[in-house]
Image (cartoon, helix red, strand yellow):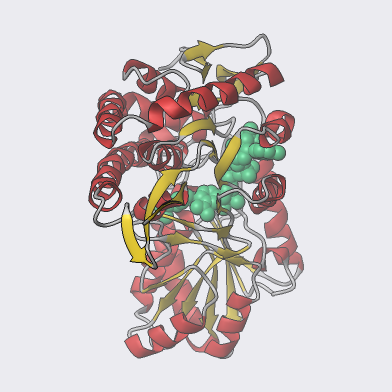
Amino acid sequence: MENTFYKGSAYINGKFVDSEKTIPVISTIDGSTIGSVAALSKKDIDMAFEGAHLAFNLWRNLTPEMRIKKIKEFAEYFIAEKEFLATLMSYEIGKSYNDALKEVERSYENIFETIEVYEKEFVNPSVIGPEVNKIKGKTGYFYNVPVGVVLAIAPFNYPINLGLAKIIPTLLVGNTIVFKPATQGSLVSSQLAKYFDQANFIAGVFNLVTGKGSEIGDYILENKRIQGATFTGSSDIGFKLASKLPMKPLVLELGGKDAAIVTNNADVELAAKEIIKGAFGYSGQRCTAIKRVLVTKEIADDLLIHLIKEAQKLKVGNPLNNPDITPLIDRKAVDFNIDLIDDAINHGANLVYGGNIEGYNLLRHTILDNVSTKSKLAWEEPFGPVLPIIRVSTINEAIAIANASEYGLQGSVFTKDLEEARTIAKYLDTGTVNINRGSSRGPDIFPFIGIKKSGFGVQGIRDSLKAMTRVKGIVENE
Ligand code: NAP
Ligand code: G3P
């Protein structure tokens, strides 16, 4: 891997495509250039959508068994290179090697779970389609059919998992796809194109377009061939996408500001362990990271002691050595987190752990106590290893602060009293509430929901299959 230069080609209509203009890919480990990604022209983008459009009829008219067979072939080429993919991910996005490997393995398992649900619930006519309705001399057959050409856009933090969680269900139900990965994440994503190519898919069924979102994104969103879109990333870009694609099926998985509420009845040791794991896994670069702690004043000191004890156990360093805390995606992310820390301190917070930069883009995991609700850190998503503790007088105050967020992805409640947990869970305005555990997307068969600024539509193995279909009726008259 060392000294290897990776070329991230695009993949359009069954052919790898390079461009004159390229974007350098900088290693998160040490800032060296590890490769380059094609910066596609508008013409290339048009070709990708045309290819997807032309392939749609061929692909959707294959039998489900034929589509499943192709996807299984893809899966085997993909998993055969799992160690290589994990290493590349460590260099490109700074994920620890073991976590990157887990991401690849999880994605492989998801492919088969998705196929299983598709076979059981979407192919069998007695369950979904045709549903036969006989009334007033009419017989109606209602089918789930693919929507057509789907645009899928993924973020940098789970390039494989979030990429395939969109691509596989979209293709299985008969759509074709134009996939735009994050620029930092394009090297590993361009490998996916290689496996589709090896599995000999019909040209145009899967297309990979690369280039900076800020330069080519608006042009992509304007393409008239797009019939549906599935996006994961920041709320700002998600809103932009929604405004450009009115009246189309959309799934948006956006930002979060997940709160962990710790009550007087909590097992404080367990809460501290879960909060540290939840806040600092992949250095906080998870939508489902715990991004604030709301704790009652009576137990805040005790919780803090345990949080610091757990924080001290975390290892910091090079992703290839499997530490807990790794370099952030880029310098801009480090600067953004430092600004949030400074602002919190200026509003009276106490820096109780971390706060310092240790090497290339590596911000030590940081805990701030007594964070004021006037500071930016109380409301903004750091997408880095910075955890604010907000002390509250009552649980009602905790719920009110949790719900005052613009985001509504997930939340956690820590208490040994299950009735108390259920009551708090009922009042939290989020997609999901986790009792005595940190937030989590998985198990992937569960619906994954974001409300308010955190999303639109539902993801998850079953829901993603449904998301890119529409209902079509044929009515026979007596
Ligand atoms: P981002 O900056 O919004 O980028 C996401 C994707 O959008 C990238 O592929 C990006 O390409 C592309 N993009 C940027 N500008 C665009 C435009 N004008 N038109 C079309 N596409 C455009 O997000 P990120 O920094 O990669 O990821 C972090 C964010 O994702 C956080 O807010 C996090 O909470 C959220 N996230 C949410 C979930 C969830 O399930 N709810 C999961 C993971 C992450 P470039 O890379 O080329 O800019
Ligand atoms: O931020 C990406 C999201 O999918 C997180 O997944 O499993 O780490 O909660 P997970």
Image x and y of residue 80, in percent: 26, 24
| Residue at 48% over, 41% down | 326
| Residue at 33% over, 36% down | 104
Q: Is residue 50 above or below residue 395?
A: above
Image x and y of residue 142, in percent: 39, 54
Q: Quadrant of residue 417?
A: bottom left
If the image is split into quadrants, where does the N terminus sit? top left
Q: Is residue 101 above or below residue 324?
A: above
Relative to 215, is 45 on the left or the right? left
Image x and y of residue 369, in percent: 59, 71
The foreground one among 143 and 177 is 143
| Residue at 69% over, 74% down | 372
- Judged from this view, the residue extending furthest toward the front is 478
Q: Is residue 331 visible?
A: no
Ligand 1 shown in quarter: top right
The tally of labels here is 0
Q: Is residue 196 above or below residue 444?
A: above
| Residue at 60% over, 36% down | 226
Image x and y of residue 223, in percent: 67, 32
- Judged from this view, the residue extending furthest toward the top is 20
Q: Is residue 295 above or below residue 457?
A: below
Relative to 197, is 220 on the left or the right? right
Q: Is residue 282 visible?
A: yes
The foreground one among 382 and 16 is 16
If the image is split into quadrants, where does the C terminus sit? bottom left
The foreground one among 248 and 429 is 248
Relative to 138, is 123 on the left or the right? left
Relative to 374, is 455 on the left or the right? left
